[in-house]
Amino acid sequence: MIKKIYFQSIFFSFLFFKEAFAAESGGMPQLNPEFWISQIFWLILTFGTMYVVLSKFILPKISNNLESRKSQILENIEAAEKQREDSEAKLKEYDEVILKSKSEAKTMFNQTREKALKDIMAKKEVLDQQIDNEINKAEKEIEVLKVSAPDKINKIAIETSSELLEKLIGSGVNNSSISAIVDDLSKRNGDKYYGN
Amino acid sequence: MAANPMSQFDVYRIGPEIKVGAFDISFTNASLFMIISTVSILLVFNFGSKRNSVLPNKMQLLAELSYTFVAKMISDTAGSKAKPYFAFIFSLFMFVLFCNMFGMIPYTFTVTSHIIVTFILASFIFIGVTIIGFIKHGFGYLKLFVPSGVPAVLLPLIVVIEIISYLSRPISLSVRLFANMMAGHTMMKVFGGFVISLGLVGGWLPLSFSVALTGLEILVAFLQAYVFAILTCIYLNDALNLHH
């Protein structure tokens, strides 16, 4: 469609400018052979020169550039691949080391824990024994005190009561009768306080 | 003068008349634009090939893309045997492309709009391809005119048609390029003239047409260069890999 319009308009343009063409010789300048030889000469000269320069100097350089780029890129890809493999191996190694050290740490931790626990247990046992000993000793002392306490108290009670009686009555009272009363009382109360 | 759409194709002498024997080889505007085109091609590709960085700059990218474009075109149509002719086809494509493109600049001259230029290029290709064909296949190259699988009765007719079509190759090749360039430029000139003659009131329509035509013509300029080069590849393919 565009082509049709194209050629129709060219056709009409030819009609339109018929007068202008009539004034010129031959109509289309392309068909005027005046400069044909010149055009052929300059075409061969310019195109030939360009062909020689392009084919001898420029195109080999471009091709060389492309080749070297290609090989360089290939090399780079190879190197990258190698490095990737290396890093993968390293990563594996690293993982192994981490795993190993983890298990080591775990065993170490466990050992230390066990040791610490053992120590603690041992110390605890010693302490327990000491505490038991202390308790036993204390109990024994308490036993001794328990046994000796009523006597001392009785003695003190006898002394105080004899003194009190002396001050109240003014004359000495027989110690033995007082002690008999105190003994009697302490026996009765002793059951209440000590619970034996 | 300026209203004549054909006056843009006038060839005129620049400087003195140069004569070698009986031949007039004066420097003309056509010669000027041939030189401009070739020099710009050489400059572009020289700068495009100077530095070789892994990350190409614009010029290098341009040169390398053109290189791979033409290389792919040749290997697709003519196969690997056509590699020795790469430089020629590359030069041809670039020359036609640059001449066409320089013709798109206003007030320039379009070298390829002259039948004599395209005809010389086409006949050089034709003669070259024929010589290559005969060198590669000897007289076996004449088998090109005898397609296989044709009934014997039709053979004389087919052979005549094939020979005519083969001989008309340079004409069709040259006229295609020349006519396209001339028609396009004439069209643009005609519409440009309409813009002036219709003035401020009615000139907008042909102006918009002109704008659209400019885009179309740039496309045509590239396309015709491509067609010229790819037809050369196809003819070369016939000569190199004779399978008809």
Image: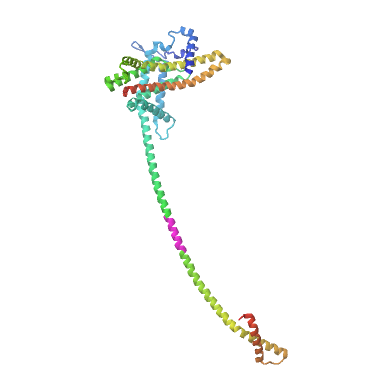
User: Which residue does the image show at 40% across and 44% down from the upper left?
Assistant: A84
Is residue B197 visible to us here?
yes
Q: Nearer the viewer, residue B14 or B11?
A: B11
Q: Could you say where residue B169 lies in the image, as x and y percent from the top left?
A: 36, 17
Identity of the residue drawn at 43% across and 58% down: A104
Chief secondary structure of the magenta span? Answer: helix
Q: Viewed as shown, does residue B138 lie left or right of A117?
A: left
Q: Residue furthest right?
A: A169
Residue toward you, B204 or B108: B204
Is A138 included in the stretch rendered in magenta? no
Q: Quadrant of the C terminus of chain B?
A: top left
The picture quadrant where one finds residue A43 is: top left
- The image position of residue B228, as x and y in percent, is 39, 21
Residue A42 left/right relative to A6: left
User: For the view shown, which residue lies furthest in the left direction?
Assistant: B138
* Residue under the point 43% across and 54% down: A99
* Image label count: 0
What is the x, y in percent for residue B167? 34, 15
**On screen, residue A114 above or below B197:** below
Magenta range? A100-113
Q: Residue B202 falls in which quadrant of the image?
A: top right
Magenta span includes A105: yes
Residue nearest the viewer, comparing A175 with A55: A175
Q: Estimate the x, y position of residue B79 in percent, counting from the top left.
A: 34, 27
